[in-house]
Image (cartoon, rainbow, N blue to C red):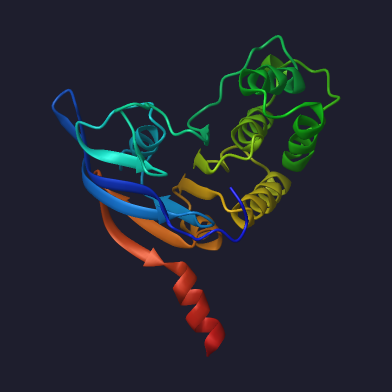
Amino acid sequence: MGIGQDLEIYLQLSHVSKEMDQNQILKDISIQCKRGKIYGFKGKNGSGKTMLMRIICGLVKPTEGSVTVDGVTLGKKHNFPESVGVLIEAPGFIGNYSGYQNLKVLAEIQGKIGKKEIEEVMAEVGLDPAEKKKTKKYSLGMKQKLGIAAAVMENPDLIILDEPTNALDEEGVKNLHSLLKKHKEAGALILISSHDKEELEYLSDVLFFMENGTIKDIKNIESEKREENEK
């Protein structure tokens, strides 16, 4: 991934539906998303935001339709996007390990990053890499920060964050904004869900409004801001 690459369609959902226990969770969703952009998903609990994100990252298969990431359709040869970082619901960690130790274990799976990068991302989210406290003693806010760090630390092409501001204090939210801006400018495609409309409008280039498993409306915030600046 390089800065200045063409912003081609990186993620495409075609007629995605999901049914569970005879309940229609998602219904006929088709969207296209480009790299170097932030796409927000706004909706109440039960609107389908989390299920949609689970399907995009390959954790759940759609009942109908397809998800294509960087030209590869999930569920054929590959079940998961090749380069993805995910925070969905409460992040789980090894309770007897420190925050740094947890990230080190995760980083060793792919072997893409080392000590320096782990320490840098921890500082970026507002955690002390030298902190010896075990994660089972972390506050909800600290766990959320560590979950965000885990999602972005390997600089993935696709970043998926479900309600990332949950339990964050004001400083934590500012750190998150700074982190997302950095990864967007580096060319990542970022998907964020939230029930907070103001937060999403501030961060997003495009905002999808979800209701009852469908996308009811789309707001192109990027073009609105551009038009406003041109006045």
Q: Position of residue 191 (x, y in %)?
A: 47, 47
Identify which residue, 58 or 177, lies in the foreground: 58
Residue found at the far left of this picture: 22
Q: Picture coordinates of residue 40 (x, y %)? A: 45, 53
Where residue 131 appears, as percent x and y from the top left, is 84, 23
Q: Residue at x 65, y 52 (%)?
A: 177
Above/below status of 105 relative to 75: above
User: Is 13 placed left or right of 166 in the picture?
Assistant: left
Residue 45 visible to the viewer? no
**Residue 61 appears left or right of 82:** left
- Residue at 26%, 39% (x, y): give it: 66
Q: Residue at x 36, y 45 (%)?
A: 44
Q: Depth check: give the residue in front, 13 or 201.
A: 13
- Residue 86 makes an appearance in the image: yes
Establish if 134 lies above or below 88: above
Question: Horizontal placement of 120 versus 112: left or right?
Answer: right
